[in-house]
Amino acid sequence: MEPNLKWIVWLLVVFPVFLLAAIWTSLIPIKMNWWLENLLAYPFLFLVYYLLLTVYAIVCRQKILILVAIILCAGFYSLTPKHVNQGEVCRTDNPIELLQFNLYYSNPDVNAFMNYLIQHPADLVVLQEVSPEQGERFYTLDDIYPYRYGGQPAVGYPSSQLILSQHPLKAVTVFHTPDAQNIIHGEWQLTPTQSIQIVTAHPTSPRSKELWYRRNALIRTIETVVEQYPSPDTLVIGDFNLSSKAPLFDEILPGFTTLPVASWPNLMASWPNWTDSISANQWFSTPAFSMIAIDHTWLKSDQWALCSRQSIAEIKGSDHLPIRTKLGVKY
């Protein structure tokens, strides 16, 4: 390898690492913007970048470069989310189970998902990107989920959200923001003497500067709602379009716990028709390391703990994976 080229290659190896470390540790006061956050939020991109550098180093037979590139690949792989995330050790003899899913407006497999809800019922189901036509179909599950919010004449589907529950939903209201986003807030009555405050929302995807500001504004509004309505037990649930590796993620909802798991993009469900045969194979799913965690559940409670969260890879039809969250009583 030519000396000048060698220095360029080493610069390509070292510079991204130092830049990311400086940003994550706030050593460099870089003002975050929408495209930079989107880049930092996706460890898989850096994993691919260093895999390519590893291949180049192997071709050029640069042993030290190979070693460094492999170490960096391993480092970025460790930053990628997993399908399962175990939380606190808690009592699971009588757990509470939540299921959240960005259903996707054009989901062709809604019936399969409904069958899953019948065969594997959850105490609370929070759905997003639900069309009115899809929402009507969930009325057939009223015997399992007798309580719902969404689809009623005076309610509609706020930000295309639908909540199904085996337990009563009380005092449910919708906070409307000036830019037409919605936050659902209410009480989930588990027993006559025990309830959990729930807050659900679906902030916009930060695909542009304007949408990035709108998403951040709604997240801050959710924090305000939680502060204005304090409760011993509070759940915040939704597709937040915020990667768990984005700098903002660690700043929001202080005092809450969360367990990020891989949920998007489910490429096998969103790629063109030539992937249909692969998608139909129950043994194949989009690998977790190629995804990010954007469908979140936060909990603040002295009594309850997040025991585990798991994305369900076998559910098809959406570019998101459904996530099952288990809550239990703290020891």
Image: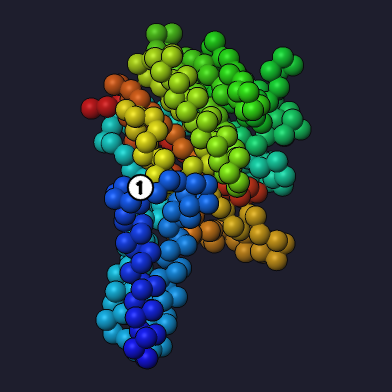
Going by the image, does 183 lie left or right of 10?
Answer: right
Whether residue 121 is visible to the viewer of this picture, yes or no, is no
The x, y position of residue 136, in whole percent, is 73, 28
Depth check: 106 or 144 in front?
106
Q: Residue at x 70, y 66 (%)?
A: 274
Q: Residue at x 70, y 61 (%)?
A: 272
Answer with the quarter of the image where residue 138 lies: top right
Disc 1 residue crowd, few under 14, some 14–19, many 20+, Cα 10 Å: few
Q: Which residue is mark 1?
A: 29
Inspect the image, locate mark 1, and give the three-letter code of the amino acid beneath it.
Pro
Whether residue 324 is visible to the viewer of this picture, yes or no, is yes
Relative to 37, is 15 above or below?
below
Relative to 319, is 186 above or below?
above
Residue found at the very far right of the displayed protein: 133
Answer with the quarter of the image where residue 147 lies: top right
The mark tally for this picture is 1
Residue found at the very far top of the displayed protein: 192
Quadrant where the image shows the N terminus: bottom left
The x, y position of residue 56, in whole percent, is 42, 82
Which coloring applies here? rainbow
Relative to 224, is 17 above or below?
below
Depth check: 73 or 114 in front?
73
Q: Residue at x 52, y 16 (%)?
A: 186
Answer with the quarter of the image where residue 76 lies: bottom left
Depth check: 212 or 312 in front?
212
Quadrant where the image shows the C terminus: top left
The x, y position of residue 228, in whole percent, is 43, 14
The x, y position of residue 203, in whole percent, is 57, 35
Q: Residue at x 56, y 22 (%)?
A: 184
SS at badge 1: loop
Going by the image, does 186 lie left or right of 148?
Answer: left
Depth check: 8 or 110 in front?
8
